[in-house]
Every structure is written in C-alpha cells, then in structure tokens.
Amino acid sequence: MAVKVDVITIFPRMIEAGLAEGVVGRARTAGLLDIVVHNLRDFTTDKHHVVDDVPFGGGPGMVMKPEPFFAALAAIREQRGTPDAVVLLTPAGERFTQDGARRLAAIDHVVLLCGRYEGIDERVREALATEEISIGDYVLSGGEVPALAVIDAVARLVPGVVGDDQSVEADSFTRGLLDYPHYTRPAEFDGRKVPDVLLSGHHGEIKKWRRETALARTVARRPDLLADAALDADEREWLKRSKS
Ligand code: 4HQ
C-alpha cells in the first residue's frame, strides 16, 4: 500500500516540480507514493483569493490567515480520510534527522503545511498541527523547500522507491556514519589516481578500506555522530587505536 502525503501551499507548482524528477518522480508514477498537492488559494472564499493579512499588534510583514488552512484540512479529511499526522514546517520545530524520516515513513497518511510571509496564524499550529519540524537553523522564505526535503527523505525509505535495497542499506546515515569516498573511471584523471586498493579486486581489503575511511571522515568531520553509530567490534578497535 502506498504512503499518502498531502501538501498545503500557495506554490503548488514549486512542490510538483520538486516531486517530478528522479527516484521520487518514478515512485509516484509507479504508485508507491500517493502525493496530492493542494493550492491554499482554492480554499479562500473572497474574490481575490487572499491568504494573508496584517499582524494583530502591528509589526512588519504579513501573517497567513487561519481560515483557508482549516478549510483545506477539512477537504483533505473528506477526500482522503483523517490523516495520522499534520506537520507544520517551521524553524521552531524539532530538528529533522534520519530518525525523524524513519518515524514518518512508518505513518500511513501525513499532511504537510507550508507557510510563507512572517508565518501562519498561531491557531493553525494549536488546532491543526500534531507536530512541528525544522530542517535546520537557517531562515527560508517558505516551508516548501523543507516539505520537499522531508518528502524526499521519507520516500527513500518506502520499500521499492530506491530500486536497489543495498543502496539504502549503504546510505551514510543508515549506519550513522559519513559515507566513504566514491570513484569511477578513469583510474587517473588530471594526475589524480584512484586508490590502488579499489583497483585490486581484493573485496575483503576494499571493504576494510571503505569502513576505515568512513570512520576516519566521521571522526574528523562529525565526531558527534559516533555516539549513536552502529559500529562492530573491529570498528571500535580501530577507533580506540586511532585515538592513541
Ligand atoms: N521557514 N525549517 C516557513 C523555515 C523552515 C526551516 C521560514 C518555514 C519561513 C514561513 N521551515 N516560514 N528552516 O525557515 O522548516
């Protein structure tokens, strides 16, 4: 059964364009992902389809009105059933990680709410959102890019979306470590040689080199990841020796 996702946005073409390419685009065509993008302006009742208004209390910028979000959610409930999660994309949310992607991938029906301007009327968060997610500590101009990031990370975990299960298995965060370096032909380019071990055909040695370079990179660049990484006895030993 397909994973159901609904996105509410004032820029539906931005979401559709981001979902049309690559593995996610193929998974949609194949029916593995059931994603519907809703134009928030379709749920306004005024002639000019206004979705924003001035902030109570004054201050800069505009705030997204609550009513169109409530109407869009009501329509989704009628057309698609009551969702299991309603996610508001906001810098104030819980940081999105691979664990968060795994958790969402196990949920049958998720709605994503994308805000623009200064933000969305607080009553949408209170009454409609079941959780809030941030993709990182930087300010974007809307929740659309975060929604695409969440959908992409979740989609990859749906069985069949990434053709080769071993690719997902090999993904850096599946093991909680950074990836090892990748090379393809030519064996020498502009004086830069591919490491000999990768040309050797010694699969045991290649595996060992990849594990060690992945570990060395993680130690150098993201030592914070090591606390939760899935390391075997050899890797723990290598790590201990690398410290002395
Ligand atoms: N936003 N992670 C939407 C973000 C953001 C983030 C800024 C969300 C603007 C209206 N969302 N508001 N970072 O920067 O999720």
Image: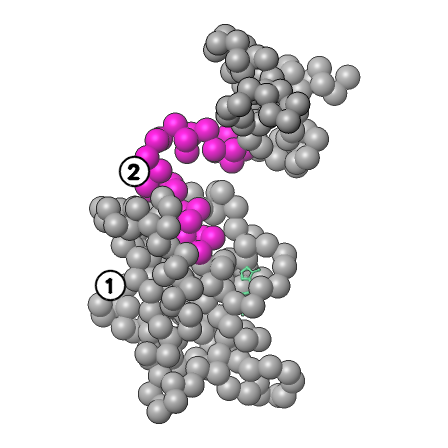
Of the 4 image quadrants, the one containing the C terminus is top right
Residue 226 seen in render: yes
**Is 151 situated above or below 184?**
below
Farthest residue, direction right: 244
Q: Is mark 1 within 8 Å of ligand 1?
A: no
Q: Main secondary structure of the magenta part?
A: helix
129 and 170: which one is in front? Answer: 170
Q: Is 69 on the left-hand or right-hand side of 98? A: left
Residue 129 seen in render: no
Residue 58 lies, in percent from the top left, at 63, 88
CA–CA distance in space, label 2 to label 1: 24 Å
Residue 175 lies, in percent from the top left, at 51, 30
Residue ID for mark 2: 160
* Residue found at x 54% / y 75%: 117
**Is 38 situated above or below 239?**
below
Tell me, yes or no, whether the highlighted magenta stretch contains residue 157: yes
Q: Amino acid at mark 1?
A: Gly
Residue 207 lies, in percent from the top left, at 51, 15
Residue ID for mark 1: 81
Q: Which residues are magenta?
A: 148-176
Farthest residue, direction bottom: 47
Q: Amino acid at mark 2?
A: Gly
* Residue found at x 58% / y 64%: 140
